[in-house]
Every structure is written in structure tokens, then in C-alpha cells.
Image: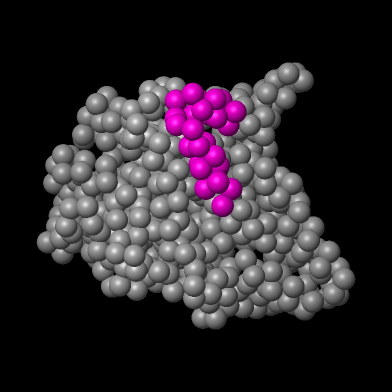
Amino acid sequence: MDNPAPLVHTAIAIAAVVVLILKAKVNPALALVLGAVYLGLAGGLGAERTLKTVNKGFGDLMAEVGLLIVLGVLLGTLLSALGAIDKLVTLLLRTLGPKRLPYSFAITMGTVLQSIFADVLLVMTAPLARSLGTRIGPGGLARMAAAMALGVEVGIALSVPGIGALALAGLLDIPLGIMLLYGFPLAAVTILLTLLLFSALVKRGFWNPDRDESAVAEGEAVVEGGAAVEGGAGFHDGAVAHDGAAARGDATAHGGAGMSGDAAVGEGGAGHAGAGVGDAVAADGDAGTARGDGTAPPLGLSLTPLLLALVLIATGAFAQVAGWDSPVVGFLGDPVVGLLTGLILACLVARRRLPAGAVGEAFGQGFRTSGQILVLTGVGGSLAAVVEAVGLGDLIKDSFSAGTWAPLALVWLIAAVLHMAIGSVTTSAITAAGILAPVAPSLDVQPVLIALAAGAGSLFAIHATSNTFWLLQTLLGQTTRGTLKTVTLTVSGASVIALGLIQTVSLVM
């Protein structure tokens, strides 16, 4: 290692970002920008080139995934307003029965429903999951809680249109259709295997209802010890009601916006007067109130826009893999066209079946959500661009062999360490992938595998810094001890299982 300076400065920059977020309560977006500026200056880029690189990294990633994120969030918000989730869970229960429900529930959340914002998805499905948990036998609550944790987190990191998967695809210049073809089945198999293992543990006495479940009054979820939002800030004396509204009006976040840290700028706090999780989901609840008038469309019609978008994107990916060069297929299979087509169809359905103003309210919530996601994703691209510019990729290239296992294990490890420190799935995955992105073309590794390894690593050790952790504890009536089992242990297991599957795939590619 002739010149370790890039590695040293990158480590300092990442450590500084962590300290700024956790200790100084600096907004993660600002912390990432400051880290990128420091790295550029310390790495010898100079002031002018550093600023240009920061801007270019932001702009390049937004050019890749910015419009996709906006279209995906808007489509998910309309699906929420159309009441698709309740009907889908009812169909799964009726078709597959209660014993298979946790598996179908988790896989559906981790794949098809990933266009719906994570916090909204959790709050909308939690009452259903809790009531169904009593119908699937002993340990039912534990299995449903694990299913929700796996569905939300694994889907975000690995499955298009999950926010993390979109960002990783854009950062590593991976066609979104290819990311869908690899990530979709990987997410489903990972969720299935992990939940099978967790269910086996539950059957052997791993779950103790007396110690792992908390007594919660009907219609109210009490936070045990104060629920922390991603990045370490917590609620004080507040509670989150099942309908998504803040209970008693005093659930104010101490450290910033309480949107899911996996996709929101508020993970970690933007000052002491931020909005809490209840505020985030209450806004969506307003957009979805139109469901109560009895005119909501049937499930097939509600899900058709999303399914159409996924089919178009997958068709484009298959055509690319098969070498089928058709202008029509290339146009229709473009991810932007696919999501735009689905969004237009969703708007037509909503305008015909929901009261006047419902679509506008849903779009307003969608724009607020996507704006936060875009900022955090973009500044993650800025840091990755500076990492490339200071030459860390060349150092890694010289230090590791071109064998398949080393880069994938390294990117998984980097993402895992970053997630344990910061608590953000998306930020840790983007940063880890960005470190190896410069050398990806020169290694005997498919870029899509690097992206998936980063996503898998970012799932490791989800704990008290994660908003998902506290939402699942609160909404499903678990103790902290129980939530450590259903969220931390389970999703960490999924992280390791996913890495094993990725490594296996790499041996035959």
C-alpha cells in the first residue's frame, strides 16, 4: 500500500459523518455533504474540484433515479389511498390460510408493495398483522412481527422499487430492469428462508409471550421507554395510535423528522422541532380517508397500475438480456415509462372511484415524502463521487484480488459497519457501494452483485437507532426484548443469508 492517505481520509470522513449525526444531531443530508467536502479537500482535490465533484455526484445520481423515485412514491401513495393493502391481506388469508400467511405477507410487502413509503406501509398493515397473529397459533404475534420487519427492510434494500435498491442501481449504473430481475427473487428467497428459520426457533420456545409481549389497550400502542427515530432521536411521553395519528397530541420528536430513516432525510434529526412519525403517517391517513365511502375499487383494479409497471420494466430487462433490439420494447420497457404508465392508470382509477380532492391530497403527501428521499439519496451520491475522485477505488483494487468473494464480502462488511454506526439502511448501502463503484468494471464481478451485497450488508444489526424497530415494538405490542428478536436478530439473519445467496450466484456468473 504505497499511499494509504485516501483510505485514512475516507475513514475520517465516514467517522465524522457518524459523529455529526449521532452526537451533534446534525441532519444526515448536511452531515454527508460536510463529509464529502472534507474528503475532497483532505484528499487533494482542491476547493473548486471538490465542489464540482459534490455537485456532479448529486446530479448524476438524480439523473439516474430521481424521476423514478418520485414516480414510485406517487404510485405507492395512490395505492394506499385506493385501499389496496387491506384487500390484498384479506385475499392472502383466504387463499393461503393462516399458517402460510406470515410468508405470503412478508414476501408481498418485500416485493410488490415496496412502492409504498415504509412508515405508511407499517402503520397500515400493523393492525391487520396484530389481529391475524392470534389466528395462526402459538407465537403468531412473533411470526407476524418478523414478517413485517423482513418485508419492509429487505424490500427496501434489495427489491425494485425499494428506495435503497433504486439508489444502488443508479449509483452503480445498473439498468433498473436487471436490478429487478436479480433483486426481486433474491428478496423473496431471503425472506422465505429467514422466516422459516425464525418460525422453527419460535416452535422451540425461543419466544416467551410473558416477557416478549406487552399488554396494550385496544386501539392504543404505548411506547416502552420512548421510541427513537432513526439516528438516535426519540419520542418523549408519546404514543402512536393504530390509525397513524399521534396519540394525545404529545408525540413530538426531539431530534427531527420521524420519517423512516431508510429513506428519509429526517433520520437522525434536523433540529429540536421536527415532526414525529405520527405526523408523517397522519398526513397519509388524510390522503386515504376517501376509502371510507364504499366506492373503493376491487383489489384487481387497485393493483393493476403497479403490476403493469412491473411487467413493463421486467419485459425491458428480459429483452435486454436476450439481445432483442426493438425500439418499441425498449421504449415501453424503460423504467420511467413503466412507472409513468402505472401512475397515469392509477390516477384514472382514483379519479373515477374516489371522491374529489383525494388524488390531490395523495399527490401532496407523495411530493413531501419523495422530496426528503431525493435529498438524502443525492447527497449519498455526492460522497460516493468524492470517494472515487480521491482514488480510494485504485487503492482497493491494488489491495484485493480480482476474485469474486473478496469484493462482495468487503462491500457487505462496509455496509454492515456503517449501518451499525449510522442506523440508515439506504445511506450505509449507498456509501459502501460507492467505495467499490470505481473498481467494479475492472473486477470479475457483476455490478448488480456489488449493489445487492451492499444492500444485504446494510440490513445487518437493525436496532434501537432504527425507526422500524420502535414502530414495530409500538404497533404490535412487543417489549424491547421481543423486538430485538423479531427485528434485530431476524433481519440480521436475512443479511447473512442474502450474502450467502449472492456469493452462490456469483460462482455461476
Residue drawn at x 69%, y 77% is 8
Residue sitting farthest toward the bottom: 24
Looking at the rendering, the stretch of residues picked out in magenta corresponds to 343-368
Magenta part mainly helix, strand or loop? helix
Q: Quadrant of the N terminus?
A: bottom right
Residue 305 is covered by the magenta coloring: no
Image quarter hosting the C terminus: top right
Tell me if 382 is positioned left or right of 165 in this view. right
451 above or below 418?
Answer: above
**Which quadrant would residue 3 be assigned to in this image?**
bottom right
Q: Is residue 118 above or below residue 90?
A: below
Instruction: Please identify the quarter of the rendering in which residue 389 is found.
Output: bottom right
- Which residue: 64% across, 58% down? 375
| Residue positioned 23% across, 47% down in the render | 130
Of the pair 283 and 67, the residue shown nearer to us: 283
Q: Is residue 6 left or right of residue 365?
A: right
| Residue 428 pos. (x, y %) | 56, 61
Q: Provide residue 480's location: percent of width, then percent of height.
A: 27, 66
